[in-house]
């Protein structure tokens, strides 16, 4: 994946203001509804949204890699330094 090494070691943290997840990859997509983090918008993020709702990523064929949900052939694009327990979809509160 182009840019992976640079993004993986990036010292800048991006984060969600509503949960404890922080990540380093600029290409990552974090869902504000279920608070899962995906390797990208066009793959994992879009795949987990079905009829306008969040679907557990594993149910749509995604796998967890380093805290990121990735599609087949993808790798985690960076680091997640603080990740919540991945026990399924969490409701926005």
Image: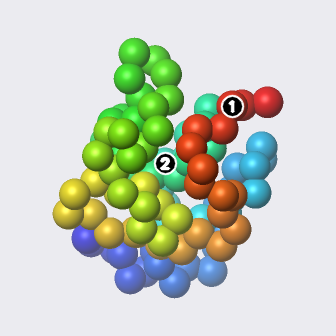
Residue with the most extreme top position: 51
Counting from the top left corner in percent of width and height, residue 65 is at: 42, 68
Task: Using the image, determine if residue 7 lies above or below residue 55.
Answer: below
Which residue lies under the disc numbered 2? 29
* Badge number at residue 14: none
Q: Is residue 1 above or below residue 71?
A: below
Q: In the rendering, at what x and y percent does residue 53 appear?
A: 49, 22
Residue 45 seen in render:
no
The quadrant of the picture occupied by the C terminus is top right
Q: Height in image: 52 above or below 55?
A: above
> Left or right: 49 with respect to 54?
left
Residue 75 visible in this rendered orientation of the protein: yes
Query: Considering depth in this image, is 32 or 92 the residue closer to the camera?
Result: 92
Task: Give the mark count.
Answer: 2
Q: Residue at x 62, y 32 (%)?
A: 33
Residue 10 falls left or right of residue 76: right
Quadrant that contains the N terminus: bottom left
For image coordinates 75% across by 49% down, the residue present is: 19
Q: Earlier in the sequence, mark 2 or mark 1?
A: 2
Task: Decide which of 87, 67 is in the foreground and name it.
Answer: 87
Q: What residue sits right under mark 1 in the picture? A: 91
- Disc 1 element: loop
Question: Label 1: few (<14), some or many (≥20) within 10 Å?
Answer: few
Residue 88: x percent and y percent?
Answer: 57, 44
Image x and y of residue 45, in percent: 41, 41
Please give left or right for residue 63 compared with residue 29 in the image. Answer: left
């Amino acid at each position: 994946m182009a840019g992976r090494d640079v993004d993986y070691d990036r010292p800048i943290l991006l984060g969600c203001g509503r949960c404890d997840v922080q990540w380093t990859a600029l290409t990552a997509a974090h869902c504000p509804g279920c608070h899962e983090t995906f390797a990208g918008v066009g793959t994992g993020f879009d795949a987990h949204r079905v009829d306008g709702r969040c679907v557990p990523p594993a149910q749509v064929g995604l796998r967890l890699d380093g805290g990121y949900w990735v599609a087949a052939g993808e790798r985690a694009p960076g680091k997640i330094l603080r990740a919540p327990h991945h026990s399924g979809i969490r409701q926005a509160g």
